[in-house]
Amino acid sequence: MATDAWVVYDIFTEEIGKGNHSLDGDDVIKFALLEVGYTPNKVTDVDFAVIDADEFANGDGYTSGGVAAAATWDTAASILTFDAADGTITAAGDDLVFRYIVAWNSSKGGSNDLIAYCLADNTPADVTILDGTPLVMIPHTDGILTIP
C-alpha cells in the first residue's frame, strides 16, 4: 500500500498568511480517517465540520476527530517544512476500513481548520486495518507542506 502525497487545502495557506494558525506546538493537530464517501475538494472544503459526516465512526479503536500529533517545523536547506509526528490508531473490536487521512487543526474550533488530505492507498482502494492491528500514520518524508 502506498499513499499519495499530501494535498494542502487552499484555506490552510490562506489562514497561515492571516496568522490564524499557531503551529509551533500551541495548536493540536489531528489525523482523522475518512471513508470512501468523502470526495475531497481542496478549494471548497474549509473546516472539519463540513467533512465529518464522512469520518470513520467512533469506536473499534478509533476516536472521533482522530489522533493528535505534535506539529513540527524544519528549516533545513533553506526550505521551511511543516510536518507532524506519527499518529497511531489500533483497531479494537472490529476492522477499520477507510479511504482518506485528513490532517486538521482541532484548536481552531471548526473554523477554517483543515490542513491537508491524502489518499491512503493510491490504487485507489479502501484500506482495512484488521482488529488488533495498529495503523501508524507517518506523514510523507517531504512533510505536509514545504515553502522554499
Image (cartoon, rainbow, N blue to C red):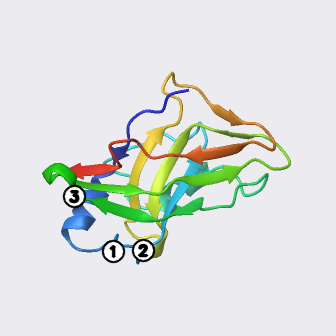
Badge 2 or badge 1: first in the primary sequence: 1
Given residues 88 and 74, the one toward you in this image is: 74
Q: Quadrant of the N terminus?
A: top right
Say what secondary structure mark 3 lies in.
loop
Residue 46 sits in which quadrant? bottom left
First in sequence: mark 2 or mark 3?
A: 2
Q: In this rendering, is residue 53 above or below 130?
A: below
Work out whether residue 64 or residue 110 is closer to the camera in this orientation and state it.
Answer: 64
Within the image, what quadrant is residue 111 found in?
bottom left
Q: Which residue matches tag 2?
A: 27
Q: Which mark is residue 22?
A: 1
- Name the outermost residue toward the right: 93
Which residue is drawn at the image coordinates 53% and 36% (left, top)? 120
Residues under numbered marks 2 and 3 in contact, where contact means CB atoms less than 8 Å apart: no
Kindly indicate whether the residue at mark 1 contacts the one at mark 2 (C-beta within 8 angstroms).
yes
Label 1: state its secondary structure.
loop
Residue 141 locus on image (x, y percent): 38, 41
Q: Amino acid at mark 1?
A: Ser
Residue at label 3?
75
- Image location (x, y in percent) of residue 34: 58, 46
